[in-house]
């Protein structure tokens, strides 16, 4: 996958996150939590939290997009994500990047 594709995915995802944050009145201390997940896990997160931002991203660029999104939001990469590599992402069928705010459970 090309760097341009990673950049495009990152920009589109950040655009969606910023719109959601604005629409739902996020405060300065409201942060997104990110997960690389399967479709089943994506559905679970979307049932439990609102708002969420989920996008399907090819497993070959998923980790790079996640790292770029976190870097641009000035969030440090967690050790969970560092432990993941392309092989485990493909083996675990992780193909969604999901953002949610743990302070905003769906009521």
Image (spheres, rainbow, N blue to C red):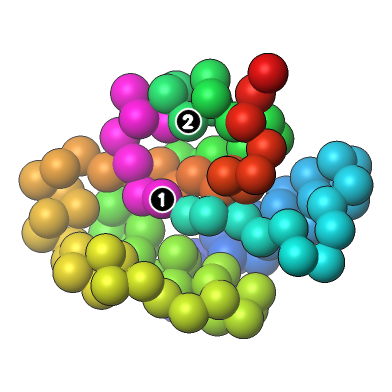
Q: Quadrant of the N terminus?
A: bottom left
Q: Is residue 29 visible?
A: yes
Magenta stretch contains residue 90: no
Q: Report the front residue among 98 and 32.
A: 32
Q: Position of residue 42 (x, y in %)?
A: 42, 31
Q: Is residue 1 visible?
A: no
Q: Residue at x 79, y 45 (%)?
A: 20
Q: Is residue 83 above or below residue 58?
A: below
Magenta stretch contains residue 37: yes
Q: Is residue 71 above or below residue 63?
A: below
SS under mark 2: helix
What residue is disc 1 on? 35
What residue is disc 2 on? 45
Magenta stretch? 35-42
Q: Position of residue 87 (x, y in %)?
A: 10, 59
Q: How many marks?
A: 2
Q: Residue at x 27, y 43 (%)?
A: 94
Cα distance, mark 2 to mark 1? 10 Å
Q: Quadrant of the C terminus?
A: top right
Q: Residue at x 28, y 52 (%)?
A: 59
Q: Residue at x 71, y 53 (%)?
A: 17
- Other-residue count near label 1 (Cα within 10 Å), few / some / many at <14 / 14–19 / ≥20: some
Q: Using residue 54 as the reference point, say whether residue 59 is left or right of it.
A: left
Asked if the residues shown at circle 2 and circle 1 are in contact, with their CB atoms under 8 angstroms apart, the answer is yes
Q: Report the front residue among 75 and 89.
A: 75
Q: Which quadrant of the figure has residue 62? A: bottom left
Using the image, tell me which numbered label, if any, was put on residue 12. Answer: none
Q: Position of residue 8 (x, y in %)?
A: 59, 65
SS under mark 1: strand
Q: Position of residue 47 (x, y in %)?
A: 53, 20
């Amino acid at each position: 996958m090309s760097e341009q594709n990673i950049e495009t995915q990152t920009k589109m995802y950040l655009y969606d996150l910023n719109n959601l944050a604005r629409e739902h009145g996020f405060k300065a201390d409201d942060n997104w939590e990110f997960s690389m997940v399967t479709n089943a896990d994506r559905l679970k997160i979307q049932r439990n939290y609102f708002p969420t931002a989920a996008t399907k991203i090819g497993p070959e660029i998923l980790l790079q997009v996640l790292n770029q999104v976190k870097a641009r939001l000035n969030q440090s990469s967690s050790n969970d994500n560092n432990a993941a590599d392309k092989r485990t992402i493909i083996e675990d069928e992780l193909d969604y990047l999901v953002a949610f705010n743990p302070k905003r459970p769906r009521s």
